Amino acid sequence: MKLYAPSTIKELKEKHGFRLSKSLGQNFLTDKNIIDHIIEDSLISQNDLVIEIGPGIGVLTAEAAQVAAKVIAIEIDQGLIPILQETLREYDNVTVVNQDVLKTDLKELIRENHCGGVRIIGNLPYYITTPILMKILEDRVPADSITVMMQKEVADRIKSAPGNKTYGALSVAVQYYCTVEQILSVSREVFIPQPKVDSTVLRMDVRKEHPVELTDEKVFFQCIKAGFEQRRKTLLNSLSGTAGLGKDAIRDILAVAGIDPVRRPETLDLREFAAIANFMVDYTKDHQE
Ligand code: SAM
């Protein structure tokens, strides 16, 4: 069965009385080259456990099952479960979990199904791309890589560098946890139904070691949040109030870090944010004693 063929999608829908849900971000892939490209660039090896987010009717799942040791596909829509049972019946290494990925304990799932490496893949439901990624990264789900399709604009933000309009808290957060590589640009025309946006596939290789040393990760993320919430302000103004520190303290901290207080947060790289956060922690300690 050519799962990716529009005629198959139509047939399965009719047979199972399935209705596509816009609110669940259901846009199904219909291009075999793109499916193959995603699977190939996910770098799945035969010992790996693959976790797929949002299998739909199973186009990526079926291909992953042929190259991985095991595939666990997490699908929220109950209406797709009988379809997946049919389309994936020849693969005895696939488990479909009917659950919301945001409420799934991925670490537990990985512990229970331990294989060689862990590769997360998916054509993500776009309405929750950022929460899904941040959950995986902040929970430190022990994955080697995350290869996922998302709305082009979100991918542009994730891979962006300092000084760009698209550079923001999401870029710094993801780049702190991962190295990011763009795999593919995907036209809106290869989906059923056609979405209003184009897509990008990124592979995020989870770093074994963080690129900067942090005294307190919480303060680092507070700094980033404060900096980008008011990105048109100077650093001095946007960071005032962070970690309970006033303007004078921030001025001192920026001086010790060697960072010009009139710079805009969007010009700072990961190392500079880390330096500020670490000096904030030192400053707080020094002024408590
Ligand atoms: N992988 C399929 C493909 O490429 O054709 C479907 C991708 S479609 C963009 C996103 C899929 O994610 C849908 O099947 C949708 O039902 C599912 N989904 C949406 N929200 C979800 C959630 N919170 N947890 C798990 N799956 C979800």
Image (cartoon, rainbow, N blue to C red):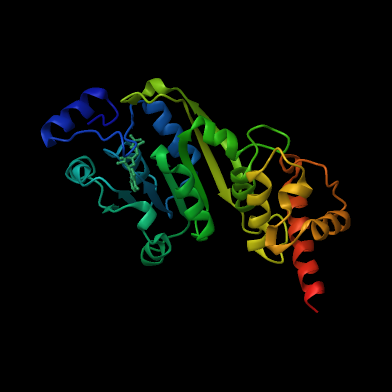
Looking at the image, residue 227 sits to the left or right of residue 61; the answer is right
Q: Quadrant of ligand 1?
A: top left
Looking at the image, which is closer to me, 283 or 114? 283
Establish if 43 lies above or below 155.
Answer: below
Query: How far across and down, in percent of the image, does residue 256 sit?
Result: 88, 58
Looking at the image, residue 183 sits to the left or right of residue 191; the answer is right
The image quadrant that residue 48 belongs to is bottom left
Looking at the image, which is closer to me, 286 or 18? 286
Query: How far across and down, in percent of the image, does residue 5 sit?
Result: 27, 25
Query: How far across and down, in percent of the image, does residue 50 sit?
Result: 40, 51
The residue that appears at 52% across and 49% down in the rendered structure is: 145
Q: Quadrant of the N terminus?
A: top left
Establish if 196 lies above or below 86.
Answer: above
Residue found at the very far top of the displayed protein:
189
The residue that appears at 72% across and 57% down in the rendered structure is: 212
Q: Residue 46: tell me if it is visible.
A: yes
Q: Quadrant of the C terminus?
A: bottom right
The image quadrant that residue 283 belongs to is bottom right
Query: How far across and down, in percent of the image, does residue 188 sit?
Result: 41, 23
Residue found at the very far bottom of the displayed protein:
289
Looking at the image, residue 14 sits to the left or right of residue 136; the answer is left
Looking at the image, residue 204 sits to the left or right of residue 226; the answer is left
The image quadrant that residue 165 belongs to is top right
The residue that appears at 37% across and 43% down in the rendered structure is: 64
The residue that appears at 67% across and 61% down in the rendered structure is: 219
Q: Residue 123: tell me if it is visible.
A: no
**How many numbered discs?**
0
